[in-house]
Image (cartoon, grey):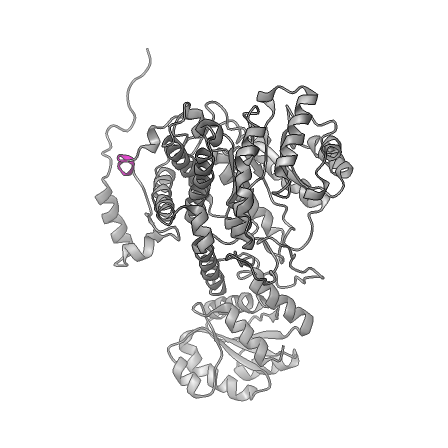
Amino acid sequence: MANKEKLFTEFVAPTTQEWLDKIEVDLKGADFQKRLVWRTNEGFNVQPFYRREDLKNLKTPDALPGEFPFVRGNKKDTNEWYVRQNIKVEDPKEANAKALDILNKGIDSLGFKLPGKIVSEETVETLLKDIRCDIVEVNFNTCKRHSLELAQLLVAYFEKKGYDKEKVVGSIDWDPMEKIVKKGKDVTPILSLAPQLVETLKDYPNFRCITVNTDTLNNAGAYIVQELGYALAWGNEYLQQLVDAGVDVDLAAKSIKFNMGVSENYFMELAKFRAARLLWAQIVKQYEPKCDCACKMIINATTSTYNQTLFDSYVNLLRSQTEAMSAALAGIHSMVVTPFNVSYEAPTEFSERIARNQQLLLKEESHFGQIVDPGAGSYYIEHLTDALATEAWKIFLRIEEEGGFLAAIKAGTVQDDINATNVKRHGDAAKRKEFLLGTNQFPNFTEKSEGKKPATCSCCCGGHQEEEETPFKKLTTTRLAADFEDLRIHTEETRVPTAFMLTIGNLAMRQARAQFSCNFLACAGYKVMDNLGFKTVEEGVDAALAAKADIVVLCSSDDEYAEYAIPAFKYLNGRAMFVVAGAPACMEDLKAAGIENFVHVRCNVLETLKEYNQKLGI
């Protein structure tokens, strides 16, 4: 007979209040709200712990995989996704050869980006030669004015090959509104092509032709809730236009695909995709489709370029891997892992192979493709899903009140919102409120750029953009690391100063201050020299001058600065820049003595380093 005895029945479960009481004791009087409650950029608070009772009013835990509202994914029994790699087509024959090669290396989804001028029957034939489009997902991106022509050519090709229409999976990336958001261009005349595009591909239920490219917002620095909220408004705008043009709502909804970005916020991104499916299903439902399957949100996820770095670029692999994990666990349709080196060069064979293998590692070795929505039931993830849905819905309603997404981007409110976030995030990075490992925190002291320069392009993923007059506002952004990279490359190309740590006094404090100062100054590419300690400040200054130091950083404890700082400053006598590591209580006295440079956690790192460069004539 099975043992039905429940374990631990003799233990009484503590209440939430008992947990809070215990936490308050451990905090020893510190403010619980300030110390442990996280106020997110998405506009809601995250508690330090969650319990079952926190889910009692949520509906998401009751959802099932593959069923409306699809919060738990579009599939019932698998979490498989397409492993996609994009190919820039300059020569169709070469692109075809590359496609065939990577299909043998784990790829089962191809993305071809081709110029509109080469769209032709011959190009399609050459590009897809020996590629089974009923087995491999095929996606295309071309000039929006040539997308209808491309769709017609693809249909003719599929019919010529005799493919089962149900088995042809893919998309055409037709999103004119992205051009308004991204470049400020007026492409409204071609919006009328949408019904024709949908009609051309209506017999291919798994081939989508209207896209919502919110990865553009992600790569421009948008917060997660902004990308989510605007994705809903963006998609609804296309859906409404199609329905108004007489397109059947089921066909219209099944023609829309979302290309979304993935940032580094692991659990929040996982919850974003769950919330996206939930909200999109609710929106489509309002149009009264005949089948709930029309409410499914098809998402291609692409790892971000916004947080990629030129220096210490292999750290980009860590960023993109956690991003890929978030997307995979969230149950997306397909995924592109951005190669780690795109911030400074075209992807190489090596970087593309690594990017492919990042997905294959998750899928084939970690078995992420086998378990549907593993985050379901997690008190934390369910809370994030609900909170993100709530905040994103507010953005969606606001845009609808403004007349819809098209009206909002014409007015520039969307672009202004994202640009303001980008400015704030750059400011936070400058103050180290937002960390970029290897760039504004813990840089590689000995790394050189070795000729690497930020990649320049017409998109908002990397280099600086040239200003041009456009009828509408556009996204103006650079990667989050760009400001520090510009400073570091300028230092490297002009003159690299030497910063010498004059460590003295309390052992623990001087070591901590020296490490902090080395990390601080190395962010500008300075050569930093740490030391074990000196008996007198005179000995330390002499050693610094012997090392030809441009900067001498006094590293000690706050109490000892009153003893050491002024004598060291006077002995140095202007022969090098003098810096005190920290913000001691005696700071005003030190300033009165002529000491003006201090580095501490409240500094704006970027502005301080720019100021030092100026003082050093760099």
Residue 558, horizontal then vertical, whole percent: 41, 75
Q: How many marks?
A: 0
The one of 391 and 120 positioned closer to us in this rendering: 120
Measured along the vertical axis of the image, is residue 568 above or below residue 172? below
Could you tell me which quadrant the N terminus lies in?
A: top left
Q: Quadrant of residue 158?
A: top right
Q: Residue at x 60, y 83 (%)?
A: 542
The one of 61 and 317 positioned closer to us in this rendering: 61
Measured along the vertical axis of the image, is residue 345 above or below residue 153? below
User: Would you say the magenta stretch is mainly helix, strand or loop?
Assistant: helix
Task: Specify whether residue 198 is in view.
Answer: yes
In the picture, measured across the screen, residue 16 lies left or right of residue 228, that is left
Q: Quadrant of residue 239?
A: top left
Q: Residue at x 68, y 73 (%)?
A: 494
The one of 408 and 425 positioned closer to us in this rendering: 408
Q: Is 458 colored magenta in this rendering?
A: no
Could you tell me which quadrant the C terminus lies in?
A: bottom right
In the picture, measured across the screen, residue 460 lies left or right of residue 242, that is right
Residue 447, horizontal then vertical, whole percent: 66, 61
Q: Is 53 colored magenta in this rendering?
A: yes
Residue 516, horizontal then vertical, whole percent: 50, 66
Magenta residues (range): 52-57
Task: Specify whether residue 360 is in view.
Answer: no
Q: Residue furthest top?
A: 1
Residue 285, horizontal then vertical, whole percent: 38, 30
